[in-house]
Amino acid sequence: MKDYDALAAVRRPIAEANGLPNHHYTAPQTYASEAQAVLHGSWAALGVAAQVPRTGDAVPLDLAGAPLLLIRDREGTVRVFQNVCRHRGMILVAEPRRIEGAIRCPYHSWCYSTKGDLVATPHVGGPGRNVDPQVDRSTLGLIEVRSHVWRDVVFVNLDGTAPPFEEANATALARWSEFEAPLYHDGRSFTLEVGCNWKLAVENYCESYHLPWVHPGLNAYSRLEDHYNIEDGGFAGQGTTVYRQLTDGETRFPDFPGLSAKWDTGAEYLALFPNVLLGVHRDHAFAIVLRPEGVDRTTEDVHIYYTTPEFDAGLADRNTAQWREVFEEDVFVVEGMQRGRAAPGFDGGRFSPAMDGPTHRFHAWVAEKLTG
């Protein structure tokens, strides 16, 4: 079956559809083409603004092979640039650091402001001559990438073709409009290195079907039957009607202000396509940025947020430990599915119409991106 036909099968109604073919999880060539169409061609998550808390902070990050630089400029604006000098393409910033003066290329010392302007070109016109009439600095600033910050996540559209972020994600923004309030990073981020294609991490997060067997502790109080599916064009996930606040006697995390009664005992978990996993609760939130590291490797950066800058440190430690345990329970599943994609007879699998709607929505979205 040609790939176009296989992708058409993915987009069929859920009861008739196949999942994405094996090579979408195992073939380097397919990984590269997906990176262009799916990750570079939409609003993909790169990192979080909390990674650059002070002016001048700079963090080098890759998006499916593209070297990028996350930076907070002198005015406090979060920006993203291609992390290469305009002279000979040298990587500018190799490790996270604070830019005290200018961004200096380690090769020939061309220098850029934190806004990306080219401000110095030593000896460019010959020894002792730092200007050259044939080198127009005004046209050689760093290449800035379209970016947008929502819920502290820094999204980028690398190829510049996506609609404005607010337009592309209008339904998700409206769904969680009650949570439009300041977020305070807890400083307890953690990272999981997972041996799977990044799409499997999205697929697993989308659905609650696996809760009784993979997360028995969580399912003991927030049961499978307490959950509901969430499906839309650019996101999918699950919600629960049973959320219990973590407490230490009389101590709890403060709630987000002005929430409706739905959130007293409810919580929702969205995969905002392509590569960020979000959760909201009455008293805290989290964001998991999936960083594809190759066809079968993914880094998961987990960031937890609270409603005020001051919160009980002991409770926050317990909360982080609980979420880490839950997310680590998923590792054997996504890695097992990755190994399973080497089975030559596997045709992408089938979907449960009742339980797998969110996963099918993600597969169909990827197929839509690849077929235009």
Image (tube, helix red, strand yellow):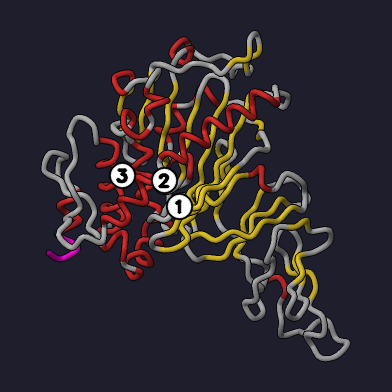
Residue 265 occupies quadrant? top left
Q: Looking at this rendering, what residue extends furthest in the right direction?
A: 128
Residue nearest the viewer, comparing 219 with 273: 219
Residue 65's x, y, as percent?
49, 66
Instruction: Determine the image quadrant of residue 16.
Output: top left
Q: Which of marks 3 and 1 is in front?
A: 1
* Amino acid residing under circle 3: Phe
Instruction: Give the residue at x 34% y 30%.
Output: 211
Residue 83 drawn at (x, y percent): 63, 66
Tell me if 105 is positioned left or right of 327 in this view: right
Q: What element carries label 2?
A: helix
Q: Residue under circle 3?
A: 362
What residue span does the magenta drawing correspond to?
A: 1-5
The residue where tag 1 is placed is: 194
* CB contact under 8 Å: marks 1 and 2: yes
What label sits on residue 331 in the rendered view?
A: 2
Label 3 environment density (alpha carbons within 10 Å; few <14, some 14–19, many ≥20): many
Q: Which amino acid does label 2 sit on?
A: Val
CB atoms of marks 3 and 2 within 8 Å: no
The CA distance from mark 3 to mark 1 is: 20 Å
Place of residue 319 in the rendered image (x, y in percent of width and height, measured from the top left): 58, 27
Q: Which residue is drawn at 26% across and 55% down?
A: 340
Q: Which of marks 3 and 1 is nearer the N terminus?
A: 1
Judged by its main secondary structure, the magenta piece is helix
On-image quarter of the N terminus: bottom left
Dot 3: element: helix
* Direction from residue 217 to residue 208 in the image, left or right: left
What distance separates the C-alpha of mark 1 from that of mark 2? 7 Å
Queried whether the magenta region covers residue 124, the answer comes back as no
The amino acid type, in three-letter code, at marker 1 is Val
Residue at position x 32%, y 34% in the image: 207
